[in-house]
Image (tube, rainbow, N blue to C red):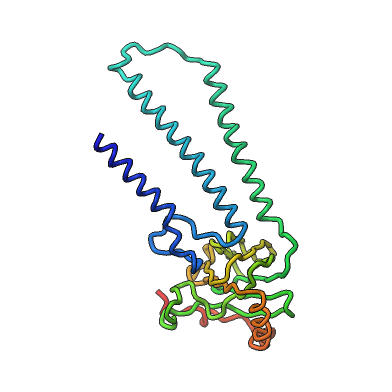
Amino acid sequence: MGMVRKLVALMTAGAVLIMTAGSAAAAQGQAVPWQLNFQDAFSPVAHDQHMFHHMLLWIISGISLFVLALLVFVILRFNKRTNPVPSKTSHNTLIEIIWTVVPIMILIVIMIPSLKLLFYVDKIEKPDMTIKAIGYQWYWGYDYVDADDLSFEAVLVEQGDLKPGQPRLLTTDNALVLPIDTNIRVLVTSEDVIHSWAMPSLGVKMDAVPGRLNETWLRIEKEGMYYGQCSELCGMRHGFMPIMIKAVSKEEYKKWLVKAKKEFASNSSKTPLKFAQVVSPSVE
């Protein structure tokens, strides 16, 4: 009994750790060392994704415990010592109906919220603005479609150039500035190979495919910095093309937009960065 209590205590402590491990990164929208749970959600899609995950966790945990209980029962009840004369039963209609119908019902319970979530992610609710994310080897370019085609590139900040508080391998020289409480349509494409624009805390992951324009949407609920990365193996610097979003109020966004149009006014004639500009041996 002592071993059982220790095992239960260990499992309880592990469950508490899993449920609380993500809270430390909430303010920064990024992962922390030894984090086991999701990053905190800051968009409606991310909230629904987390709810669906938690529902599935309860279902699969119940199935696993039920199967474990059956295995323990069979081992204890039908071993050679306790059951020297085995049953000759080879068919049971009721059991066969149960093990066919119950999994079907479980799949239906999973299917309904799953399809709802898929349609919710795919349907853009009256977008208030549109941005275009373009993947290059190995950085991201952004076009503000509704802002006179304002565009700029966001390149990884080398480790030696980081300022205090800037996370390594996640900081870019230019942040994608977006307003909160705004339905934002995101068009995603690529100029060379397949990339993937992923922001875990906002529930977004969309492939950037050359010659194809994919779209998704997001609605940021809170001001702050949010970080993501390319989630598709796109070459030797796949791990060095981060995404950095600065979420601001609508009023602050309008002010930034005025300054950004002046700052990036020459970007319309700017050619993509050359290979030598984005490959640096200093990042390890």
Q: Who is closer to the viewer here, 269 or 92?
A: 92
| Residue shown at the point (29%, 37%) measured from the top left | 4
Rendering quarter of residue 283: bottom left
Q: Position of 70 compared to 182: left or right?
A: left
Q: Is residue 181 above or below residue 104?
A: below
Nearest the camera: 70 or 214? 70
Quarter of the rendering containing residue 89: top left
One can see residue 187 in this view? no
Residue under the image location 40 percent in, 29 percent down? 69
In the rendered image, the residue lying farthest to the left is 2
50 left or right of 182? left
Measured as percent of width and height from the top left, residue 253 is found at 65, 77
Q: Is there any visible trace of residue 283 in the rendered image?
A: yes
Horizontal and vertical percent position of residue 100? 57, 26
Above or below — where is 149 with respect to 66? below
Figure quadrant of the C terminus: bottom left
Reply above or below: 67 against 190: above
Residue at horizontal 72 percent and vertical 78 percent from the top: 147
- Residue 144 lies left or right of residue 203; in this view the side is right
**Residue 1 appears left or right of 18:** left
Horizontal and vertical percent position of residue 265: 68, 87
Q: Quadrant of the N terminus?
A: top left
Q: Position of residue 160 (x, y in %)?
A: 41, 82
Could you tell me how many numbered marks the image carries?
Answer: 0
Residue in the image at 55% along x and 16% along y: 93
